[in-house]
Amino acid sequence: MNPVLNITPVKTWSWLNVNEMKYDGPLPERAPFNKNPLIEVPEGVSIDNIGDSSSLNLEDEEAFMAEYVRENRNHGYSIVVPENFKPARPLIIDYVLDADNPVVVDETSIILGKNSSLNIIFRYTGNIPEAFHAGITHIDVGQNANLTLTKVQLLNGEGNDLDYTRIEQGENSSTRTILIETGAKRTVGNWQSNLNGEGSSTSLKAAYIGSKDQVLDFNYRMNHKAKNTRGEILGQGALFDNCRKVLRDTIDFQRGSGGSKSGETENVLLLSDNAENLSVPLLLCVEDDVEGTHASTTGSIDDKALFYLMSRGLSKEQAEKMLIEAALIPIAMEIEHENTREMALEFIQRRLADETNY
Amino acid sequence: MEMKKTYVDAPDRSVYDIIDPLDVGYQVSSGLTEEIVREISKQKNEPEWMLDKRLESLKIYNQIPMPKWGPALDKLDIDKIITYIRPKASAQGSWDSLPENIQNTFDRLGILEAERVSLGGVGAQYDSEIVYHSIKEELTQQGVIYTDMETAVHEHEDIVRQYFMKLIPANDHKFMALHGAVWSGGSFVYVPKGVRVDIPLQSYFRLNAPGAGQFEHTLIIVDEGASVHFIEGCSAPKYDVVNLHAGGVELFVKDNAYLRYSTVENWSKNMLNLNTKRATVGKNGEIEWVSGTFGSQITMLYPSSILAGEGAKSKFTSVSFSGEGQELDTGTKVFHAASNTSSTIESKSISKDGGAAIYRSSVVVAPNAKNCKSSASCESLMLDDISRSDTLPVMDIRNSSANVGHEAKIGKISEQAVFYLMSRGLTEEKAKEMIVRGFVEPITKELPLEYAVEMNNLISIELEGSIG
């Protein structure tokens, strides 16, 4: 029986097939990973191998993922940023999977002390079909601390990726997450921010391209648990060929979240009649003094914009590629590290060149 | 200045809670067995094929598990539900021929007056059977058929057999299987080609007995180029035991035809309302759903539209008001199965005093359906911090030329809007009253005047200070 991942916070009709994702890919057991992925470690940040310690703590329904990572973990870090410390440079963890090290199952724990900040970037790349990543990142963001988290997964189109992020936010803390998890044949992305402290805020921007027979399955959630919290999710994607994409994004205004505001937006360019595009924007609320909005649009390339560009001398293929890039590139441009940004941009442009023949 | 929270009354139910003394003609024992199903069929003197359908439905009911999503239905014990109660009255064409208590019930509910003033035909169901049916003579002359389902099974057997439970089969879900086994009452409407029925037809369903179930079946066929507006109303008095409503509504809107199906539902708070409604729409045909849900303890109701013909359209407008002890799980499903089809959804909900209002929907565009458009808009108003409001839409889009948009909003009434109206001379209370009434206005404006008035009367507003 296939393990179940990405369980939707509130179930709906089962025939829609969005309540969960039944993962049917490989699950390597106890494979080694013998490379050092650290590229840049800013001074003042404490980083140790995670060793035997663990802060694995997923929700009951995600028990499979927690147990799998616990049993098969082969890498990970325990990172602490001291109070009041703001590193000048980002911390980059770069997992390059190759024939000798095709599998990484990582667990990383990050603690940001009060008034501190951190820009941390995870990169997962590898041009081999056996490439596999599964991982859980736990981040505790202290009072008034700021986190910028970027995850870029650009595995070969035969690889598999199961990535979970859990963020706990203290009072007046802020987090920004950029996710470009889009390379693997099966990409399972699960991100959650718990706004536990009054005045905390979070944002997530995610970009994806689905092509060939890829499966992209995302589950993003903002839990507003305290007063005056803020949240924003933006998902931008383009779908080609026979891919299947499910994006669940949830705003949950829980008891005690009065004065909070949150919004989620997803825009999908659907560029194939054989692709499956499912959007599940959920809005849950038990508080009256909140403002929540969600919006989801699906469409093809805007005819007027296409006509305009072609009237300026571009070919149809050029114009289409430009307009699709315009939807995705702004998110990649938010990455606060030049090399990583270039990597993401190059991937997007290359993938779009393949799909649009330009 | 200290702003106090606004108080919004729950809908006034007094006229609905009057219980008629029980004066039953016949009833089956409680529970669901093959024997009971056979007895219901025998009481109706049905053809063999209908009994076979009932028995097949019973078999399916026993095989399908309870749903794993949505409100908990553990209060439902089918062994305690009486699935068939026939009052001491058969279908009449005149109110005066009915027993006085039944006549008075429908008079209190405003049905007699409505018929006089604004309806082309009326069906009235009391417990499990239709007790009154009428249709204006000019409609009959045009070939319009509006009768109770039992009469239709006998007098229009061929057409009923062709359509009955074909759109919503018994294996669709557990409560449709239950419906198929024990259905009773309901209305049959046929509008011939090209006939435009300008005055609405209405059926009203009244459940009087405690611990009973109502399982009416409504079958409407609007033939090519025809049009009709059908209104459905329902209510029951409040008891301490559970009542169950598992009706079935099948609507066939043929090419270039139009059907508006309006419902104002005000079941009592011991009622489990598990109704199933579905329409199929032909080429350039149009279905409009207008739905007001105010009653029941638990409602699971998702009128669905299958846009089967090219150019077909669906419009869905609904309001729900969930108060203390209520969980109203409502929404819609739209299937764009053909090209150039379009759908709009507008849903409003209000929740207060611990009530839960859930909006649940699906919009599906099939791979072969080109150039489809769909837009959905949901707004939820929370009036306190002990209630709940969830919005659970799903879009499944599989054609690249589709243009689909969904937006939703939740919150309290904007203080800026209140300030604006006050700057125009209104008092704070009047400003808030205007905003709340305006919130439900998209629904009330779609109903005939008498029903819009009734819907507004269901919500009486007493405002003190700010809302929320």
Image (spheres, grey):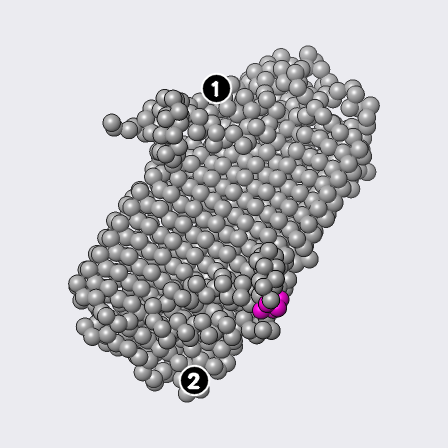
Q: Position of residue B447 (x, y in %)?
A: 60, 27
Label 1 Cα crowd, 10 Å radius (few <14 / some 14-19 / many 20+):
few
Pick whichever, B301 or B287, lies toward us. B287
Residue B14's disc is: 1
Decide whether the magenta segment is chiefly helix, strand or loop.
Answer: helix
Tell me which residue sits at (31%, 83%) in the image: A36
Q: Which residues are magenta?
A: A314-318
Total of numbered circles in the picture? Answer: 2
Q: Secondary structure at mark 1?
A: loop
> The residue marked by circle 2 belongs to what chain?
A
Check disc 1 and give the amino acid type. Ser
Q: Kindly identify the residue that appears in the image at 35 percent across and 52 percent down.
A: A231
Which disc number belongs to residue A98? 2
Q: Secondary structure at mark 2?
A: loop
Please provide percent x and percent y for residue A85: 18, 66
Q: Amino acid at mark 2?
A: Asp
